[in-house]
Amino acid sequence: MAVLFCAMLALITAAAAAHLFRNTAPKAFSVFYLVLPWAWLLLCALYLGKHPLSPRRFALALFLLSLITKGAAALLLRTPPESDFYLLYYAAKELAGGNNMLNTTPYFQYWAYQSGFVAWMAFFIRFFHAGLPFFLLMNAVAVSATNVLLYCLCRRFASHRAAALAALIYLCYPAAYFMVPVLTNQLMTELFLTAALWVFLSPQAEGKKLYGARLGAGVLLAVSNLFRPMAVVVLLAVLGGTLLYTASSRQSLRVCACSCLLFCAGYAAVTQGASLLVCVSGLNANGLSNQLPAWKFVLGLNRTSLGRYSSLDAVTVFASEDPAAAAQALVRERLSAYSVPELLRLFWDKLAIMWGSFEDSSWALTQRVMDRLQSQGLNGFVRYWTDKWCRLGVGFYTALLALAGLGAWAKSRRPSLSAILILAAGLYFGAHLLIEIQVRYRSTMLLFLLPLTACGTDAAAEQIPRLWGSLRKETVFPL
């Protein structure tokens, strides 16, 4: 499994480095963008070694630094909602005012699972008179809390310093900064997903505490699914990783079975209970279901759009009498039409876009935002530094991929629950070979990779002195 995981990371690294090289002039500058983040990480490691902070102080400093920087980005840009985000915000405001449009709008009938996020926003709008700045600042708080939880999750597997370096990579990585100014459900989902992993992987839990942690993790994962449904990847990874760990470590099969059952029970109880509540309350007759699951596959298998949104597909599916049947027929047609080489070519093109492209700033820097910045004389400044930051982001991205591969390889030598993270990353990667891709979805992968990055940092810290010592012993200096 570690070999396949490292092969996957190698493909992603190659795609990202190739994209950076092709889109950088002069080409030699691409080396600078790849090397500078490594140098920064080395300096941070040296600083943390000479000026150590206690875990609590580091977590507090990390949260405050993230909140200040992310909050500044949110308030500076204040991106007005567009596309699906506008519809979600508009529906929330209508619901807060007493007008429920979720049962009369086709969008919310097809994708009823969006009702949870709408109701959540409507609650704050109605009782706290929240506006767009409130939700953007809440995004900043969510990302900052995720950063701290990631640090805590990394400490489940690695030393304080290695976990701190992994958390600093997430702090500097551009993806979150581009999504904080956007009214999206993605950030709250990632917060609760990270919390679920942290609780499930608690190393101190035994007996009743162990079972309580498993049940609580299932509940947290279900809450993440109420904002945006992608918990199935983590659910499968947890079950598979736990079974692999039990088999390789010869742990009690009864404890494994109880842990998995409680985890699934917590998840199912909240998921089904919330969906039933939404249905019974009249918020949405379809509960929190997905009435058009084939739609993501329709887009993902579109060769012309390379797996991205296609307006032609939208017309084909939604202009038909039965959109669900039309979507399923289109998926079957495309799967039968592709030869194996053609399908592999589509997979590679999607991989290059989804995992190799620069982070997508277009969600934050919309035309309306750029027009406002231009009136303030800031548009050139923002465009220039956004471009440089995206290029440096490739350096951070390839660094964490390399260290994650090393960490996965090191952890594969002995039984470890890190198999959950490896499986989650692999399943998330594999799912996007088939379904619609958007570069902004890439940030979720960091939640699975960064704890392995911390493991890789520890492994590198152990091996480098040994290699250096070996070289010094074997080197013969001529007189």
Image (tube, helix red, strand yellow):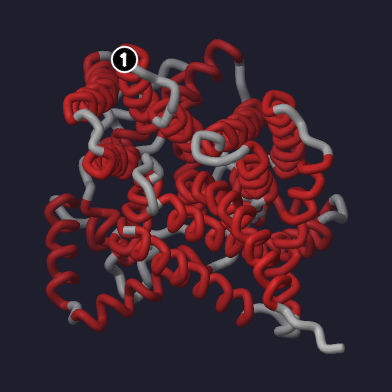
Foreground pick, 406 / 340: 406
Q: Quadrant of the N terminus?
A: bottom left
In the displayed structure image, the side of residue 36 where residue 432 appears, left or right = left
Return the residue at label 1.
207
Locate residue 198, reporting x and y percent: 46, 30
Locate residue 34, reporting x and y percent: 68, 69
In the displayed structure image, the side of residue 419 where residue 364 appears, left or right = right
Quadrant assignment, res 267: top left
Depicted 365 relative to depicted 238: above or below: below
Quadrant assignment, res 301: bottom left
Residue 387, visible in the rendered structure: yes
Locate residue 479, reporting x and y percent: 87, 88
Foreground pick, 135 / 31: 31
Question: What residue do we see at 67% from left, 46% from top?
Answer: 165
Residue 310, visible in the rendered structure: no
In the displayed structure image, the side of residue 391 where residue 323 appears, left or right = left
Depicted 377 relative to depicted 149: above or below: below
Question: What residue do we see at 81% from left, 45% from top?
Answer: 47
